[in-house]
Amino acid sequence: MVMKNFNSRFPLVTKRYSLYLILGWTSIIIVSSVWNIYQTHKETMEKARIEARTVFEHSLAVRNWSAKIGGVYLPVTDKIQPNPYIVSPDRDVTTTDGKSLTLMNPVWMLKEIFKLITRQSLLPAINRTVSLKYVNPENKPDEWEEKGLLFFEKGEGEISEITDINGKPYMRVLKPLKTEKECLKCHAFQGYKEGDIRGGMSISVPMKPYYDGEYRTHVTIAISHILLWIAGVGSIVILSRSIQKQQETIAESEWKFKTLSESAGDWEYWVNESKEIVFMSHSCERITGYAQKEFIENHNLVYDIIYADDKASFEKHLTNFNMPQHEDMEFRIITKDGQEKWLSHVCGPIYTENKFFGRRVSNRDITDKKRLQDQLAQSQKMESLGLLAGGIAHDFNNLLTAIIGYASLLKDEIPDASEVIKKDIQQVLTASEKAQKLTSSLLAFSRKQIMKQSDVSLHKIIEGIFEILKRLIGEDIELKVNYSEIEFPVFADAHHIEQVILNLVTNAKDAMPSGGRLIIETATLILDSEFAAKYNAKPGRYMMLSISDTGKGIDKKHLPHIFEPFFTTKEKGKGTGLGLSMVYGIVKQHEGFINAYSEKDVGTTFKIYIPASSVEYKDKGIEETAIPLLKSDLRGSGTILVAEDEETVRGFLKDTLETYGYNVIAAVDGEDAVLKFGENKGRIAMIIMDIIMPKKNGKEVYDIIRKINPGIKALFISGYTQDIITSKGISEEGLEFIEKPLRIQVLMEKIKNMLK
């Protein structure tokens, strides 16, 4: 049934293309018929002009003949009277037998000839002789004729128009008349000279016969084109049916292949014997971020995205490209948005009739599997180290108890001992005390310390040791403390938290031997499940303690090991390697976690996350969602679209922004964000959105919204550090970004500055 429904689409495709062909053929027929009709009309007009020109030439011949012979004399009768407009002494003559004759000049003769034609024909041709210096009022030109005569004086040879005479259409052609030598006999008194163009002859021929012929031609053109159209459409229909049958056969094969390739979760592609890509599955974009088209256009892209350290092994894997089998392998790639992913790679040869046609490749995304394996291995390693350290510390403390005890007894039992003996005993006690401190650190790492926890203020703990910290770091290091605008109480051992701060500040001091800057910051946060899961923590409210320095930094290869016991990068004799181990253990014992970020010669930042106390906030004088210590200059107005798929973070942002005076429209994913922006685009002044969201990520949403409103303000947020460090879509375009967990003070300052 599915196949039938799928194949039914292909006749629709064929019909659509057939319709396009029919429409194209129809357009050709229409254009052809219109062109032929237009040409026929032009020919009709030209035929009428030719007839008018012919009549003109005949009339001109009569005029010239009459002029050359000096005109024709006719007897004066009741119908033929002397022409009063002929100015010539020879107009009237008397014969020897006493008969009176009068001169009939060429113009008069033409008028009489065309009067006869008019009487004898239903559609006669009409002749008019006109002049700009007329004598006879009948020769006065109308407006059109006058304009033509003026053109003739400038050198024009002919003008024509379609006009209406006695309610019937006529083609009227006006041509110039030159003054001949014979004409001066009657017109010299007007100032005419031989060759002057002072008049013209207008010939009008009836158009009805021509229009009748044109109509018959148009009918013939229409019928022939209709027959051509029918023949063409019939041929297209027959051809489309034949193609449709072939398409159905091909479509079934393509459907099976397409269904198989597109439903596969793995990234599949085929390369031919020349190592050129001939097929790329749609899943490539989901895994790599690059579209099918990008791989097809750039065959090297498959190799270019491989992680630099893994390229050599991949090249070795493909050394013998034509081998029947290749071993499976794993390697890393860098996706289009800068993420690092692990792939499991399998490839096999393609043979047809024992001829090698290339290889089929299947890549599976195993990033999550690798990450879980690494997290599990690291967790098991740290747990094992903790158990080992705790066991050693326990046994070692038993030994130290005996050593310290017996040394103290010995000191008391020989009070009269020499100074040398007393000094030796004191050395034993001093060394034992140092050893005890080491065991204390091991116990802290193994989370075996006894803690005295209570609801405490992290701010007050920092304030309590502030002077100690200043003396500890010295004058060449600038110390700055930035407290969060509000504070959640934490259930913690204040003394152990002091130890954490002192240890981290001591490490920062050692990293800045030539001076620098040390910043201690706190922030109130709400961690979503996605961010908390990365550190095996619980989502909810946290206090974040950040300690940053501008020191020499930690090498990336050392970062994964800095919390392991006895690991140190300091010179021999300058560190035990237990300071950060103790910090790690104390933080873990408080059910928190610690994150370190460092760049060589830039500095190091440690961020410690401690869960907020479960005590009701109202008992501590803090509203659960309200912010009591508002800064008036951070308040604002306007509507902000918040796109965040994590419900707790979305709620936190909505409550916070509304507290600061903003209106909030919340969206649960990328598509919802685009929809709600379209519905409220006239109101929204800014968008805040997570980079990683279902359906459409933050960058895709931003690109769509920017087409609607190019000037929209956008602030991106994410719990993935690499989003801001390596993401080409965010950092390279210079877009605004804040890393999760969000600090209220930083967030509101950023929004205020962006909306200024």
Image: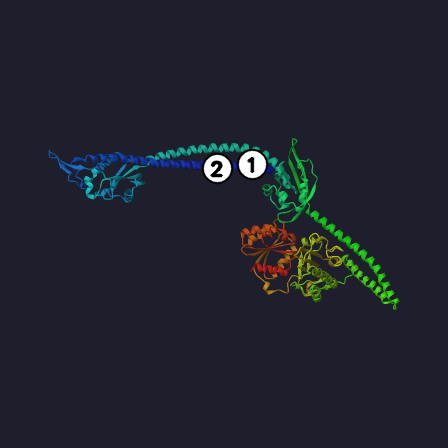
Q: Secondary structure at mark 1?
A: helix
Q: Is residue 720 visible?
A: no
Picture quadrant where residue 595 is located? bottom right
Picture quadrant where residue 7 is located? top right
Would you say 215 lies left or right of 365 here? left
| Closer to the camera in the image, 390 or 450 | 390
Task: Identify whether 21 is placed above or below 681.
Answer: above
Q: Residue at x 44, y 37 (%)?
A: 30
Q: Amino acid at mark 1?
A: Pro
Q: Alpha-carbon distance for marks 2 and 1?
A: 19 Å
Indicate the quadrant containing the N terminus: top left, top right, bottom left or bottom right.
top right
Q: Amino acid at mark 2?
A: Gly
Q: Residue at x 58, y 62 (%)?
A: 636
Q: Is residue 633 visible?
A: yes
Q: Residues within 10 Å of mark 2 (few under 14, many from 20)?
A: few
| Closer to the camera in the image, 137 or 502 | 502
Q: Nearer the viewer, mark 2 or mark 1?
A: 2
The x and y percentages for residue 103 are 17, 37
Picture quadrant where residue 118 is located? top left
Q: Mark number for residue 24?
A: 2
The x and y percentages for residue 585 are 75, 57
The x and y percentages for residue 365 are 67, 45
Residue designated by label 1:
11
The x and y percentages for residue 352 are 64, 32
Q: Residues within 10 Å of mark 1 (few under 14, many from 20)?
A: some
**Mark found first going from the N terminus, 2 or 1:** 1
